[in-house]
Image (cartoon, helix red, strand yellow):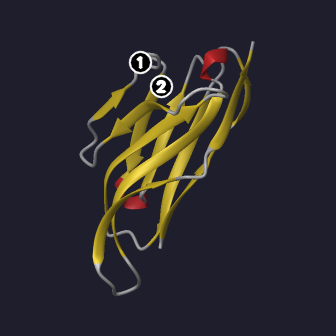
Amino acid sequence: QVQLVESGGGLVETGGSLRLTCAASGTVLSIFDMGWYRQAPGKQREFVAAINRGGSANQADSVKGRFTISRDNAKNTVYLQMDNLKPEDTAVYYCNADVLTTTQPGGVVIRKVIWGQGTQVTVSS
């Protein structure tokens, strides 16, 4: 079984910075795209940023110039550096990954998209 675990959320003042980390563990044969999404109270989950295995990245217009996504393929980990945070960035942040794994140890190889449990980011005004 493969899972994603996020960390790095917290409370920060407007203009501050946070770095989110998301690590995949378990039977990981390969990871294709990795990304970050967020969901604010009463709103739908929205795309924040994504990065492919080769390092090509894209971000939502609302975070361009402030957030940077990166990854370490050797560690099966993706990061989100968030600078110049604003109150409207307050949300639960989720990472996801398109992974190659197995149904069970030594079992059939499958490809699936998995999600982390989420980490709260709160920006005070």
Residue at (49, 19) in percent of width and height: 66
The residue indicated by pointer 1 is 64
- Residue at horizontal 41 percent and vertical 74 percent from the top: 27
Side of 3 where 64 appears, left or right: left
Indicate left or right for 111 with 20 as reference. Answer: left
Q: Position of residue 2 (x, y in %)?
A: 46, 68
The residue furthest top is: 125
Q: For numbered disc 2, what is the local secondary structure?
A: strand
Quarter that holds the C terminus:
top right
At a point 48% along the width and 25% down the height, the residue shown is 67
Q: Picture coordinates of residue 40 (x, y %)?
A: 62, 28
The residue furthest bottom is 106
Q: Does residue 71 appear in the picture of this structure?
A: yes
Asked whether the viewer can see residue 86, the reply is no
Q: Name the residue under label 2.
A: 67
In this rendering, the answer to whether 85 lies above or below 39 is above
Q: Are marks 2 and 1 in contact (CB under 8 Å)?
A: yes
Q: Which amino acid, by three-letter code, is at mark 1?
A: Lys
- Distance from the alpha carbon under mark 2 to that under mark 1: 6 Å
Vertical order, 54 against 48 (above or below): below
Number of labelled discs?
2
Nearer to us in this view, 13 or 32 = 32
Q: Looking at the image, which is closer to me, 120 or 20?
A: 120
Residue 17: mark: none
Q: Counting other residues with Cα less than 10 Å from the Cα at mark 1, is it few (<14), some (14-19), or many (20 or more)?
A: few
What secondary structure is marked by label 1? loop
Identify the residue shown where x is 52% and y is 33%.
45
Q: How crowded is mark 2: few (under 14 residues within 10 Å), some or many (20 or more)?
A: many
Give the amino acid at mark 2.
Phe
Quadrant of the rendered image containing residue 65: top left
Q: Where is residue 74 in the image (x, y as percent from the top left)?
A: 37, 60
